[in-house]
Amino acid sequence: MPEVLKAPLVVEFPFTRSLGPVQSAFLTGLRERVVLGVRTTDGRTLVPPVEYDPVTAEEISDLVEVAPTGTVTTWAWNHEPRRGQPLDTPFAWVLVRLDGADTALLHALDVPGPDAVRTGMRVRVRWAPERSGAITDIACFEPYDGGPGEPTGHDGRFEDPVTGIVAAARLDYVYSPGRAQTAYIENLSGRRTVGERCPSCHKVYVPPRGACPTCGLATSEQVEVGPRGTVTTYCIVNIKAKNLDIEVPYVYAHIALDGAGLALHGRIGGIPYDEVRMGLRVEPVWTEGGRHPDHYRPTGEPDADYETYKEML
């Protein structure tokens, strides 16, 4: 059996969100080296602040400043920092209850090793030299031997408040298509489309999944299908995708290859986008050195009868 493929993949996008008055004041305060919490009707001070009481669900907005010093309530050692984390050397993740607060704030503690951190130790905020109104304006916490710090008495009102944030969301992972799809991809590089047949219902799955989703049985019998097929459904794409050199509008379709029991995705070319239709007969177009069809084009055959592909819509 050929070696199962695997490859590193990255999913990354900017996440943009607006801020309500409480979160806006909190992040603007960090920019100004002020830590704000919110006081509930029963007198608790929540840091980080929220806009609704987690116990009663009532709206809360009474901002109150707390000290930049506090006490570690619990911790865990991070021996290998990852990209984008607060420090690039090993550090402790800590929950810190700031002086004047009733809840704890999660952040990094800069200490030389796990023996230097303990529950109950005193710490203080180390501010970032450049601040923009984000949680990273607290660079980290550091050990502190003194008593409670003194709040400045800020009321939570600022000029030029932060009204929104953009956070870069990113997921790095290694993907493996498994045995069945590895064989499918390897066959595509030889310009052959090969699916797998279910031993019970005899449906041929393309791309293969290694098991029949209907019968639950493993599939291993390989069946070559196509190369021609029928457009079952389609959509017209009008928004240009980043890093995809295809002019819009273009058509992306479900294509039932001859002999397959499942339609696959493919781009339709060689025909005006507004002439693509259900039942259109198409064939793959390969580029030099390509490991999969670049797109599908009309074969010139008469359109397929609806009854021949209605089960694959």
Image (cartoon, grey):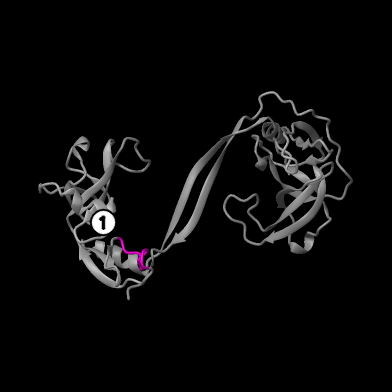
Q: Which residue is mark 1?
A: 292
Q: Residue at x 69, y 39 (%)?
A: 129
**Horizontal placement of 174 versus 201: left or right?**
right
Based on the displayed image, in which of its 4 quarters is residue 2 positioned?
bottom left
Q: Magenta stretch mostly in which secondary structure?
A: loop
Residue 53 is situated, as x and y percent measured from the top left of the image, at 74, 39
Numbered circles on residues, count? 1
Q: Residue at x 69, y 23 (%)?
A: 159
Task: Give the residue at the far right of this rendering.
Answer: 147
Q: Nearer the viewer, residue 124 or 231?
A: 231
- The boundaries of the magenta stretch are 207-215
**Horizontal placement of 214 versus 279: left or right?**
right
Task: Give the residue at the far front of this rendering.
Answer: 307
Residue 299 is situated, as x and y percent measured from the top left of the image, at 12, 49
Residue 232 is situated, as x and y percent measured from the top left of the image, at 24, 48
**Horizontal placement of 89 versus 224: left or right?**
right
Q: Nearer the viewer, residue 232 or 117?
A: 232
Task: Give the residue at the far top of this rendering.
Answer: 159
Q: Is residue 170 visible?
A: yes
Instruction: Confirm whether the magenta stretch covers residue 133.
Output: no
Task: Give the residue at the far left of this rendering.
Answer: 301
Q: Secondary structure under badge 1?
A: loop
Q: Is residue 286 visible?
A: no
Q: Residue at x 17, y 55 (%)?
A: 228
Residue 285 is situated, as x and y percent measured from the top left of the image, at 19, 51
Alpha-carbon neighbours of circle 1 within 10 Å: few (<14), some, or many (≥20)? some
**Horizontal placement of 154 versus 179: left or right?**
right
